[in-house]
Amino acid sequence: MTLKEASYGGKLFRPKPEVVLDQGLNLFCIATSWSTKQAAETFTDGIIKNYSLLSQDQEATSPFDFLSDLTIEQNNLRTAILLANDDLIKNNSKEYTQGIELFVGLKLRNEFLWAQIGNPSFFIKKDKDQLISLGSQKDLSFDFSSDQSLPPLPDELLGINKRPLIHVQSLKASNRDKFYFISHSQIGTAIQTGSIDSLDTLSKKLSDKMPLHPFWIGEINFSQ
């Protein structure tokens, strides 16, 4: 599992995500903290530890319901996030100081599982195909203005609700597939035309379309 990433500053502020790769679990976390970098690092460490414990001990008790429409692995991923979210809630008990957007991905044999709340948007590229959107996200600022005048604002965050709506999904994936992530206020039509063969190409398309807005882009590759 390898990571390539790039960012663009623009004229406005957007926090840069923290990315953690766990080669042993074949799992990665992309956490965007709207407070401090340390908050994202502590949060992702908690998720990885929680998932590792849950996956090793199938008899482990959980304070959260087992969802019958999810697999064991998907439930473990969701529970690992909810446990880490409880810690965020405790830190915010007296004053709200921490909020995190999150994407967690996990490769198990020929299946890719992911759980998400907030940015980044998620795309897959199979061989020479164009990017296929699998998890498009928007900013709260989009609800108030369709132009580029407002700065980025998170629409969904962990650390606010005890039972956040976590989107958990899966798909069949090969090691040749590449996964792309875009943390941006409004992606729009910027990547719908032409081929994208590198992060440089993707970065140019986004910066040309919306020069005011900062963004972060990443590519995860599971090929050996």
Image (cartoon, rainbow, N blue to C red):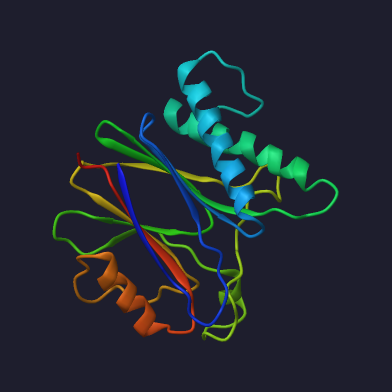
Residue 65 % position (x, y): 61, 28
Front residue of this view, candidates 200 and 149: 200
Q: Is residue 114 left or right of residue 79?
A: left
Observer able to see residue 70: no
Name the residue at the top extreme. 59
Residue at the far left: name it: 128
Q: Nearer the viewer, residue 192 or 91?
A: 91
Residue drawn 76% across the image and 44% down it:
91
Q: Please state if 100 lies on the left or on the right of 24 as rendered.
A: right
Q: Quadrant of residue 155?
A: bottom right
The residue located at (86%, 48%) in the rendering is 94
State the residue lying farthest toward the right.
Answer: 94
The reply to whether residue 170 is visible in this rendering is yes
Q: Is residue 134 left or right of residue 175?
A: right
Specify the quadrant that holds the C terminus. top left
**Residue 118, how many percent across, how many down?**
54, 57
- Whether 217 is drawn above or below 173: the answer is below
* Total numbered circles: 0
List x then y, in percent, for residue 129: 17, 61
Please give the name of the residue rendered at 65% of the width and 56% of the height, measured from the top-left corner.
36
Q: Would you place residue 71 above or below residue 5 in this image?
A: above
Q: Residue 73's spot in the image, x, y percent? A: 43, 29
| Quadrant of the image containing the N terminus | top left
Q: Is residue 80 above or below residue 119?
A: above
Residue at x 31%, y 77% (from the top left corner) = 204
